Image (cartoon, helix red, strand yellow):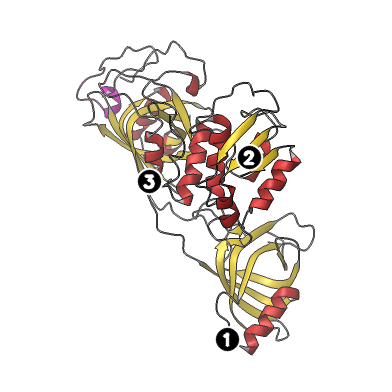
Amino acid sequence: MAARANDSITAIGPAAATPADSVVGVVVNPNAGLRPEQQRWTWEHPAGPRWLLCGDIGFDDSYDDVPLALCAEIEGLFVDLPPRSREQFTFVGCAPVGVLADLLDRLAAEALGTERAWLGNVSLTAPTPPSWGEDLCDVVVLAQRPNATTPETVDIDLDGFVYVNDRTDAVARPGGVDEFVVQGWDGTPYGVCEDVTGVFREQAAAPVPQVRLLGCRPEPPLLAALDALGQSPKASRRRRWLRGDVHMVAIDGSAGRVIDAVVSGTVSAAAPSRLGAGLLDVSIDVVSGEPLPAGVLDILDQRRAGRPSRRNLWAAYSRELRHQWAKVALGHHSSAPDPPSGTTYDLDGRFVTDIEGFYCAIGEAINGPGGYFGWNLDALDDCLSGGFGALPPFRLVWHDSAVARAHLVAGYDRHRLRPATTLEDLLTILAEHGIEVDLR
């Protein structure tokens, strides 16, 4: 039999039944009705659960953010992938102008290296109206040749990156567009072309095709999906589709969402787990999406016992993991009244060697070790409007600011695929919000 919402924490169901029939019963939570992060999540096993999955089962139009499972481990969600490969594009039948025309003239006159043939970030739009667009980043011109059918135009080979959320994203070709406008990100015209190849594509397969919930205690919606495993695949696929956001469960049973940690796919198998009596190992076949870097686990482990007690624990991390540090800080940010405007905050600038380091440092300056105060420019702007630990106008004493002045300089940021954010950019944003910055 399947577990019911009011079952106690004991093994239920006949031993020879399906895996779903042998799970422990679902906890009666006295905090039911509160948001997942307001509840306390426990079970009877000696080691507490590490993860909570909240989301929805099925293909319904509505999305229910309900508890789906507690589990001890999640395999396949935190994996280091190789660097994304550069992609090849061709602008077909192109009539170049401006910067692109000048670059092609130099390419024809001399052998250019990749640095000198660099075009930067490019936007593709429809002529009228510009209701559709795709961005290409870190673009380098490789070669050109006359177009076979329209000799007065050229075909231009390039490489770079399509700007997407992750490498598996589909890029749909727009309907009814028979000419593409090429321009810089600042709107500077680069020309028009008849077609573009290498940009549009179907959704790619997930680089890690399966996620496994190890030592899992399913809640009723997931139990229903497990019950559908015995049905024909076609009939049960709708009942077995799962999408869930992952929350880390701390030692005290509190849960904090892990930003961008999502399990999405079809429940494909379940078996008794070696991690505890009455627990299951549940397999989910993933359709798309990238895992988070494995180093996120180390960042989260530092949060399991509560907020960090020391500043600058992020300083030894790479740029990507500093970015993840700020995201974890956001997932664990708790709202509290802002101190009065005019408060002075001290920013430790010794490790602000990149823009990600700035977000980590200002988060700790405002909200203490492990604190959050933005993870990108838009989020920083939101925080500077109040409600995130500081009420403007306030005073920011930036110690060892020479480090940021030496590192946050103009140029192209290949890690973020956009123009670099400089110290002067940050000072301008802070000044616009009435923040007095004392550079020391």
Q: CA distance from mark 2 to mark 3?
A: 25 Å
Residue 8 x, y percent position in the rendering: 32, 12
Name the amino acid, label 2: Ala
Q: Are marks 1 and 3 in contact (CB under 8 Å)?
A: no
- Residue 18 lies within the magenta run: yes
Single out the residue that lies furthest toward the right: 128
Residue 145 x, y percent position in the rendering: 62, 85
**SS label for mark 3:** loop
Residue 153, image quadrant: bottom right
Residue 160 x, y percent position in the rendering: 55, 67
Query: Looking at the image, can residue 289 be seen?
Result: no
Residue 309, image quadrant: top left
Q: Residue at x 71, y 38 (%)?
A: 436
Residue 437 appears left or right of 348: right
Q: CA distance from mark 1 to mark 2?
A: 43 Å
Give the labeled residue for mark 2.
379
Query: Looking at the image, can residue 371 be seen?
Result: yes
In the rendered structure, which disc, 1 or 2, sits on the residue that comes first in sequence?
Answer: 1
Crowding at dot 2, Cα within 10 Å, few <14 / some 14-19 / many 20+, comes out as few
* Magenta stretch, overall SS: loop
Q: Which mark is residue 111?
A: 1
Q: Which mark is residue 294?
A: 3
Crowding at dot 1, Cα within 10 Å, few <14 / some 14-19 / many 20+, comes out as few
Residue 399 x, y percent position in the rendering: 57, 42
Q: Which residues are magenta?
A: 12-22
**SS label for mark 1:** loop
Residue 139 appears left or right of 8: right
Q: Which mark is residue 343?
A: none
